[in-house]
Amino acid sequence: MDKLGVVGSKGFSDYVGAIEKTLASGRASERSHYPALKTLLESLKAGITATTEPSRIECGAPDLLVRQGSAIIGYVEAKDTGDSLDSAEDSEQLRRYLGSINNLVLTNYLEFRWYADGQPRGAASLGTLGTDGKIKSHKVGITEVAQLLTAFLEHPPQQVATPKELAKQMARLAHRIRELVVQAF
């Protein structure tokens, strides 16, 4: 352990190395990097389990489900390395997710954007992908990404404790159902 917390810089250097190794094959896709991201997330906090390509939920099929025990911590939606997260952020898919998922990370494996309760909470980047397929690290990237992912993992699971909270959740789902019906017709 070092000042980054549980995972330390070695966990991130292993993660970046795994991404670079997969990219070097020349045949990598978005899904090729799931194992590296899963390993990184599970190393950040004890008791975390990340499931790649979990079963579909009402708003779609995010790429990773993150749990601690039986409690759902959140979801991760991954795009291919080098893809613009600005484009992904403007997509109908992300609008669906933000309307239904209370804790979400959007990533292209180098840049990470965290959303909680439908609102952006932070963004951080490990670096940029060079034309040689190597990742050019940002000086404070590891620290910032570690902080962002730790905050994501520590965000309290969505719970219903009062009738008002239940009403808010049901209203959000009703709006989403209305949007889907309008789109279908």
Image: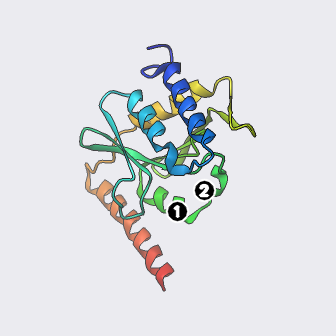
Q: Amino acid at mark 1?
A: Gln
Residue behind mark 2? 88
Above/below status of 150 relative to 97: above
On the image, the x and y values in percent for residue 158 come to 33, 47
- Count of picture labels: 2
On the image, the x and y values in percent for residue 131 come to 75, 40
- Report the disc number at residue 93: 1
Q: Is residue 68 left or right of residue 11?
A: left
Spot the residue most to the bottom.
185
At label 1, counting other C-alpha atoms closer than 10 Å, the crowd grade (few under 14, some 14-19, many 20 or more) is some
Q: Is residue 177 left or right of residue 68?
A: right
**At x 55% / y 24%, what residue is drawn?**
13
User: In the rendered view of the protein, which quadrant contains the N terminus?
Assistant: top left
Residue 78 in view (yes/no): no
Nearest the eye: 174 or 103: 103
Above/below status of 96 relative to 152: below
State which tag comes first along the sequence, 1 or 2. 2
Which picture quadrant has residue 137?
Answer: top right
Q: Amino acid at mark 2?
A: Ala
